[in-house]
Image (spheres, helix red, strand yellow):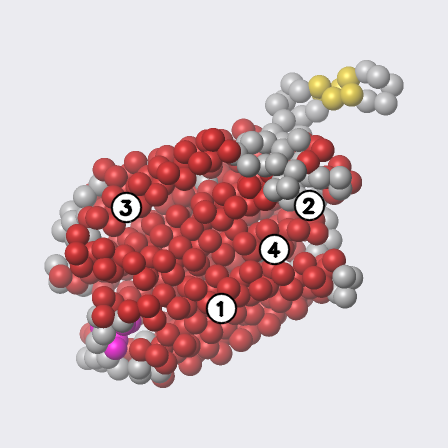
Amino acid sequence: MGSSKFPMRYVIVLLTFICTFVCYIERIGFSIAYTIAADAAQVNQTRKGMILSTFYCGYACSQIPGGWAAQKIGGRRVLLLSFVLWSLTCALVPLDPNRVMVLVIARLLVGVAQGFIFPSIHTVLAQWVPPHERSRSVSLTTSGMYFGAAAGMLLLPSLVKFRGPQSVFLAEAVLGALWSLLWLKYATDPPRSEHPKASAAGFGESLLPIKGTQKTKVENGGHSIRTPKIPWKKIILNLPVWAIVVNNFTFHYALYVLMNWLPTYFELGLQLSLQEMGSSKMMPYFVMFVFSNIGGVIADHLVTRRILSVTKTRKLLNTVGFVLASFALMALPYFRTSDGVVFCSSVALGFLALGRAGFAVNHMDIAPRYAGIVMGVSNTAGTVAGIVGVDLTGRLLEAAKTAQLDLTSPDSWKAVFFIPGLLCIFSSFVFLLFSTGERVFD
């Protein structure tokens, strides 16, 4: 691996793709296993929402620390440690809907551990990937999330049916351990010479973690002490950063609501069994996988051929993706067949994934040196969206039941899908107004 015919940066991108694939098998796996176990134990929707959202509380707490740790000690090391921690938690914790405190603590731990992953990935990719390859590299890496969710939706309901909900935890732990071994064996820090444009692009060795006492040569042959400071104030007050933050919030609000509540919508809203739906239930996430990579290829083509500037490319793909997704989200509760819901959720998630070629790559455009930090800040917002959206959905459905609305009625689900739809429209305007593809942070 890493030969001249297959450069090492491609190995890193492939490994980060597998990383996000495994992470999202874990997330969709818990949603499926817990939903089935909780429904069997007659757990109400409010408690389900609370348990499902607990992961995101832990996830939110470790986003910015994750970016800081990746900046200081290296994304490669942080990524390995986080994977080992969440895999061990999955292996050791029992899935019992009645042991609420055990599940809360376990989901908090898994959330904290996984919160370090995406800031670390962005730090690693900023070190390894040249600017003209970033869109498709980030798109391929993040498409692992959707491929993992698709694989989870296809395979895990059958695993639950034949081996029980606990088997999902054990399968996830094994996958986590296998990826950790691959990363430990093959992942390395990049040399400056890995790509001929590395030095000019400002990535590679110059973006590796720097110890406070590290010396660097200066023109007169002497040495100076380099103590890089993270520009926290500039990051927090920067409008292009906020454009990313707002869109990250909206993207994850829609994604996490669908990921955590779509199984309930199929089971209770449409009275369908996930085990009996066959391969159709994984289509929304498979479409996300395809559209994510299409978005990356289109973005790199537009930039490399100089058809559009980086700024216009990011804004175009973000706007098209989010606006079309908003229409599909708001139409979803009016579809009352499995094929209709699968189609509508596929369109929504597919175009949201296309939009990631806008805001999700923008971290490395504006701040390649601090990509992990900016990712940590924006992903904190995305995680807050998970906490708010997943918990709020449970409360909205419980309120609908209190108002004597049947959960099979479209009226019970309108607010659930209208909220992310409207957020998509708002966020697309924010990105159009305030984002940039130019480097903002030195």
Which element is circle 3 on? helix
List the residue tagged with mark 2.
130
Instruction: Describe residue 180's horizontal placement relative to residue 1 as left or right.
Output: left
Q: Nearer the viewer, residue 344 or 363?
A: 344
**Amino acid type, residue under disc 4 in the picture:** Arg
* Label 2 secondary element: loop
Where 119 sits versus 413, above or below? above
Q: Secondary structure at mark 1?
A: helix
Image depth: mark 1 or mark 3 in front: 3
Residue type at tag 3 = Ala
Residue 268 shown in magenta? yes
In three-dimensional space, the C-alpha distance between marks 1 and 3, rounded to whole angstroms, equals 27 Å
Choose the circle earlier in sequence order: 1 or 3. 3
- Span highlighted in magenta in the image: 265-270
Name the residue located 76 percent from the left edge and 61 percent from the top edge. 305
Q: Is residue 306 magenta?
A: no
